[in-house]
Every structure is written in C-alpha cells, then in structure tokens.
Image (cartoon, rainbow, N blue to C red):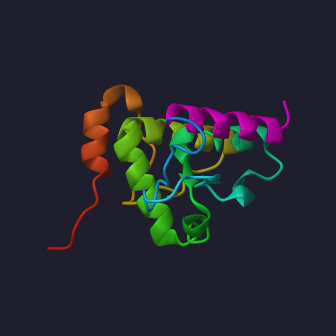
C-alpha cells in the first residue's frame, strides 16, 4: 500500500467515525465542516521511514480541520491544543500509545512531541484515566 492510499484510508475512517463527509466538524473551531486531515507530527520526521510514516497516520496523531483552521495548524500552540483535544476524544493512554508506536518506528530517543511535557511511558502500568490526569495541562498558580 502506498502512503497516499494509507493516508486516504486513515482520513476516510476518521470521517466515517465522526458521522461522514459533510457532517464531521472541525476539531479546532467546531463550527465549520472538516475537509482536511492534518498530521500533528511533522512530516519531515517521517521522511525515508515507511514505518514511521504509517504510524503518523494514527487517528490519535491526526486532526480533521476546516481549511481556515488548517492554515493555523502548524503553530505549536495550535498543535498542542489539537493534541489536548485528541486526548479528550481518544483518551490520554491511546494518544500516548500512538506516540510510542511512532517513537519505536523512528528508532530514536523520544523527544517531546506531545504538549505538557508528556514523554512515552509503559502503558501496561497506566490506565487511560491515569494517563489523562497526567496529561492535563498544568496551569500557572
């Protein structure tokens, strides 16, 4: 399967899971129908690595956006907000598990790609609820 086919299948399944084309709303603004799938992991991190490229298509590491919000999606603050929303949608453990799959595929030392300084950890010792609590943003006092 080519990358384009894998990306199309991931995008299609995300739309179907959210009610279908034309009904899935933007993950960022929630006001306009989503038309674009945006990968939250920079595509440059997957170049030349088919396994990492495939791992980056996980729904937990992607967002469905309207064109207006897609233009903002490369801003680190917007990316962090999309990760936070994915943690609410899929559960913190699922997002971290998808990130761990990406890290394993890159065969590199983990770097922070998730907001709130979340590093990969052993998911067997954590529940989704625990992971979500740990993933909650820390507000300044």
Quarter of the figure that contains the N terminus: top right
Q: Is residue 17 magenta?
A: yes
Residue 90 at x, y percent in the picture: 41, 37
The residue that appears at 55% across and 40% down in the rendered structure is 59
Q: Position of residue 27 (x, y in %)?
A: 47, 53
Please tell me whether residue 79 is drawn above or below residue 125 in the rendered image: below
Give percent across and percent down for residue 85. 39, 52
| Image coordinates for residue 38, horizontal then vertical, percent | 62, 54
Q: Quadrant of residue 7?
A: top right
Please tell me how many numbered marks the rendered image carries: 0
Overall secondary structure of the magenta stretch? helix
- Residue sitting at 68 percent across and 45 percent down? 106
Q: Is residue 99 above or below residue 36?
A: above
Magenta highlight range: 1-18
- Of the pair 7 and 26, the residue shown nearer to us: 26
Residue with the most extreme top position:
124
- Based on the picture, tell me whether residue 25 belongs to the magenta stretch: no
**Residue 118 in view (yes/no):** no
């Amino acid at each position: 399967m080519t990358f384009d086919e894998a990306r199309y299948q991931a995008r299609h399944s995300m739309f179907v899971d959210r009610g279908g084309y034309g009904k899935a709303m933007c993950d960022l603004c929630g006001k306009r129908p989503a038309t674009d799938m945006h990968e939250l992991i920079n595509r440059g991190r997957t170049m030349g690595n088919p396994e990492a490229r495939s791992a980056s298509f996980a729904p937990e590491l992607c967002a469905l956006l309207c064109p207006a919000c897609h233009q903002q999606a490369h801003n680190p603050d917007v990316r962090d907000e999309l990760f936070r929303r994915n943690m609410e949608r899929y559960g913190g453990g699922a997002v971290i598990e998808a990130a761990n799959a990406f890290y394993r595929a890159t065969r590199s030392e983990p770097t922070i790609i998730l907001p709130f300084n979340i590093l990969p950890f052993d998911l067997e010792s954590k529940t989704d609820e625990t992971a979500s609590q740990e993933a909650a943003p820390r507000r300044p006092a």
